[in-house]
Amino acid sequence: MSVGVIILWIILLGIIAYFAWNYYSLRKTANFIDNDEFKHLAKSGQVIDVREPSSFQNKHILGARNFPPAQFKASLTALRKDKPVLLYDNLRGQNIARSIRILKKEGFKSIYVLQDGLDHWNGKIKEK
């Protein structure tokens, strides 16, 4: 094998390792739950939509608050650390991973994510 091929393999393995580490660290920090469990926890928790405001205005889970990515960290003062935080995006986009990391860093313990996102939600919604 040439040196170039070996370097490409090392880069590829590094990328795969990064994504695997990212996946497992998020799974360790947050609980990914189905629709039924999300509905149950939403009764006592804080439902947060991490999509952009325009998407939130068009359609969102009834009772959810919008913490867009650009303002997520600043919005945390509106959350209580003693109540579960339930996050959702469309289909677990990049906003979820970033939001989980911020919540963990800020000391939130009970973090839940709607497993298949709003795209597969079968509960009550508010549409424009």
Image: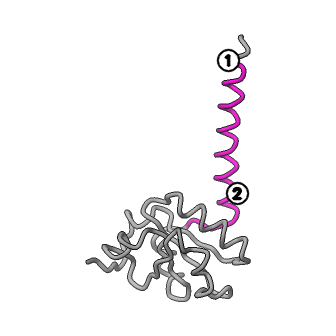
Q: What residue type is labelled 2?
A: Ser
**SS category of the residue bearing label 2:** helix
Which is nearer the eye, 124 or 4? 4
**SS category of the residue bearing label 1:** helix
Residue 15 magenta: yes
Left or right position of 68 against 23: left
Q: What residue type is labelled 1?
A: Val
The label on residue 25 is 2
Q: In which quarter of the image is the C terminus?
A: bottom left
Which quadrant of the view contains residue 74? Answer: bottom right
Residue 20 locus on image (x, y percent): 66, 46
For the rendered model, the colour scheme is one colour
- Residue 54 drawn above or below residue 4: below
Which quadrant of the view contains residue 86? Answer: bottom right
- Write the start and end of the magenta stretch as one range: 5-32
Gap between marks 1 and 2, in whole Å? 30 Å
Q: Nearer the viewer, mark 1 or mark 2?
A: 1
